[in-house]
Amino acid sequence: MSEHIMSSKFYYTIWIALLCLTGITVAASFIDLGPFNAVVALVIATFKALLVVLFFMHVKYTSEKLTKIVIVSAIFWLFLLLALSMADYATRLWT
Amino acid sequence: MSDSPIAVEQHGPELLHHFADAEQQRDAATLGMWLFLATEIMFFGGMFCAYLIYRFWYYNEFAAGSRSLSIRLGTINTAVLICSSLTVALGVRAAQMGKRKLLVILLLLTIVFGFAFLGIKGVEWYDKYKEHHVPGNSFNVDDLVRDYPQLHIDPRHEQIYFSLYFAMTGLHALHMIIGVGLFVFLTYDAWKGRYTPKYYTPVEIGGLYWHFVDIVWIYLFPLLYLIDQHRLG
């Protein structure tokens, strides 16, 4: 991974993209989208997180496959935590 | 390794004797950091889970609480953190290329951005303190009850929103403080010239930590500030 040195222009591009996405998510919060306000905000946040993980944290160019397995597993555990918890709390009022 | 005298002679932080080569050592350090970050995801995940459940239960109170935060300051802080992530990424690049002065400058800039974030966060917390929105004996949300009569706010449930707000931003700020501390050490070592294109692992994995803390904020910002601006009633 160290062999892969990106140009500074590339990092500036990612930085601009992150700032633009922040602007878009703030602007979107002023528009009434009903329940989709949360969806739009979280999709944009995930896109920003992806940019940071893949390019700033060099995951896209890492030769080490184990790193990717750890990341995917961590996200899967988080998904289990949130999904199974909500499967309980969100369905308690069902009859 | 005992039958290879060359391996014994190359003994330094850039290649410890139990690694086959520098790349294996670097990969091991990076993997270890990612494992730590996986535990951090679960650490913050518990808080996000609590937030999700209580937002589901006490939606009105969460909407009103979210409305009382400053989107302006939150946006500025998001931009500050993104800028700090840029200086970290450029810093790692400077270390890869062996540019010592540039690395020191970028690490110092990161620390400045870190303090800027914490300062703005402190201003926000102080505003909440003045408004009596800090959970505890002086907690009082009569202002929100008055401003949003259609929401029928229960102050006890409102207190849960602000407890989560302070717990989540507080835990995040604690990580920022630790990050700034780490970067002070990195800056010192960088200034001493201890990082070279062959060995800059501390800069790389310190950077991973910083970017992770940035990502946590990327999610905290919309969840706490942005998503409940409408549907008020």
Image: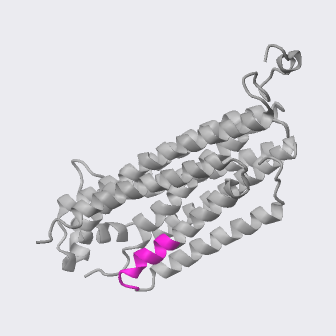
The extreme left residue here reads A95
Residue A34 placement (x, y as % from top left): 36, 84
For the point 83% across and 53% down, the residue is A5
Magenta region includes residue B143: no
Q: Is residue A11 visible?
A: yes
Q: Quadrant of residue B10?
A: top right
Q: Quadrant of residue A83?
A: bottom left
Q: Nearer the viewer, residue B8 or B56?
A: B8
Number of callouts? 0
Q: Nearer the viewer, residue B108 or B5?
A: B5
For the point 47% across and 43% down, the residue is B39
Considering only vertical position in the picture, is A30 above or below B60? below
Considering only vertical position in the picture, is A26 above or below A71? below
Magenta region includes residue A37: yes
Considering only vertical position in the picture, is B55 above or below B169? below
For the point 83% across and 45% down, the residue is B96
Q: Which residues are magenta?
A: A33-43
Q: Is residue B130 visible?
A: no
Residue B141 placement (x, y as % from top left): 24, 63
Q: Quadrant of residue A55?
A: bottom right
Image quadrant holding the C terminus of chain B, namely bottom left
For the point 77% across and 29% down, the residue is B20
Q: Nearer the viewer, residue B111 or B1?
A: B1
Q: Main secondary structure of the magenta part?
A: helix
Q: Is residue B59 left or right of residue A54?
A: left
Q: Is residue B148 left or right of residue B224?
A: left
Considering only vertical position in the picture, is B50 above or below A90? above
Residue B98 placement (x, y as % from top left): 87, 42
The extreme front residue here reads B3
